Amino acid sequence: MRTRVFIMSILIACLAFTPLVAQGSQEQKQEGPVGIEFFSMKNEAQGVMGTLVDNFEKQNPDIKITQTFVPDNETVFKTRLASKDVPDVTNIFPATPFYKKVFTEGFLADLTGQKFLDQVPEFVRKIAEADGKDFALPVTLSIFGLYVRTDILEKYNLPKPTTYDLLISDCKALKQHGIIPISFADKDTWTIGQILERLIGVINNDNDSEFKKIADGSLAVADSSTLRTFAKMMVELHEYSYDDSMAVSYDDSLADVASGKCAMFIMGSWSLGTIETSDPNIDTKLEMIPFPNPTGGETRVPINIDTAYSISATTPHKDACLKFLTFLSETNNAQLYADEEKTPNIIKGVNYNVVPFKSIVDNYLNKGKIFLTPVNIWPNGLRDQLKVPAQQLYIDKNVDAFLASCGKIIKDYYNK
């Protein structure tokens, strides 16, 4: 019954959506190599995954992998879950409640005891567990912060914005010099939701406790210091961005940073590989630093499991899928992935030394000055709903209206 309820909830959510991919996990009688489908949530990794798949097929000529990369991949994945068409291997985000539920509802295979998991640090495996069981092979952690063009700051003798006051001071100076200080790609609303979630976490690592008080009525949303601080900060920062950030896409934003049109932007480690396609020498001019806590409190860096792989619980080709995950867990293959994809790689033996992330990894990630991103703690779907009032806030700059809308959404999701 629980499985049927879960499937129906996904069907309702995706009712108006037309699947973009053909079913790929149905058992077929065929001669020749075994065919499995790899479904990716990380379109930015398409190039390096193509190389890894080619290398795998050379070593395993009896297995053929079909790769699926589509826009709005998570919506497509949910649609396929609803029709019980689970891809053989899927790139997932196992720390989030949604994917843990996908596993506990029986859609993903139990990987507990698989040898390739020995390649993963114990603390990462714990984050990725559900009901004490392993259901994914984690490969990378994302870090989220403020990218700065260090060459532009140096040109105008500006300090790295290690405090919020310095950030605003730099923005004022850059604007006077005709440089767009900070880029926001609000046309792609997923960036709105992700920045909201991560920066709320920076402001208050324990924001979940505050949201629970809003939900039970013991704290008026108007008195939420976390949400009010976030709203006022984002209204201020948008004054130093594009005249119309709603017309700017994620790709446009990255291109502007690569060209030097913009000096800073807020995003995760996964963006670096895309920026490098515009400027292969960007590593000498770009650095990620922690986004400074605007409250003046301790600054910690948001992390999440960014690349991880799971297997369908119903795939007829489980042995082939396990071979593929074993291949991806091997140090030499993880090194190739790290060198191309750039996100901090946690597979044992990988030499991770990506210049733009060196300082933040050494001084924050390796020293434990981190927190798990709120999306892994919030009720499933909350982030996607909160991005709606956030988008309106960036248009009308009405902080009180933003708070009121957030309060209704938080009460709805926490009281379900």
Image: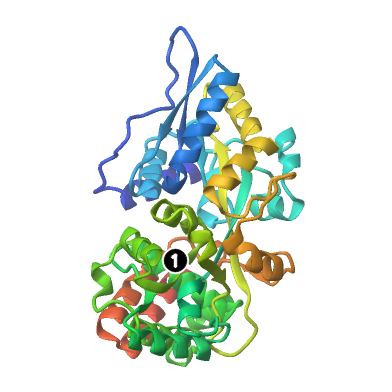
Tell which of 41 and 78 is nearer to you: 41
| 18 on left or right of 293 | left
Residue on which the image places disc 1: 194
Q: Secondary structure under badge 1?
A: helix
Up the image or down, 356 lies above or below 51; here it is: below
Residue 110 visible within the image: no
Q: Residue furthest front?
A: 155
User: What residue lies at 40% left-to-right and 67% top-to-bottom?
Assistant: 193
- Judged left or right of residue 378, residue 408 is left
Q: Of residues 348 and 281, which is closer to you in this image?
A: 281
Occupied quadrant, residue 123: bottom right
Q: Is residue 308 above or below residue 300?
A: above
The structure residue drawn at horizontal position 48% and vertical position 52%, both measured from the top left corner, is 273
Above or below, comparing residue 206 to residue 131 in the picture: below
Coordinates of residue 158 in the picture (x, y in percent): 50, 85
Q: Residue at x 48, y 42 (%)?
A: 3
Pinpoint residue 220: horizontal percent, then vertical percent.
Answer: 46, 90
Task: Sort mark 1 into few (<14), some (14-19) or many (20+) by Cα contacts within 10 Å.
Answer: many
Is 365 on the left or on the right of 155, as rendered?
right
Render colour scheme = rainbow
Residue 102 position in % (x across, y down): 52, 45
Picture quadrant where residue 82 is located: top left
Q: Amino acid at mark 1?
A: Gln
**Can residue 169 be seen in this snapshot?**
yes
- Residue 356 appears at what percent x and percent y? 57, 63
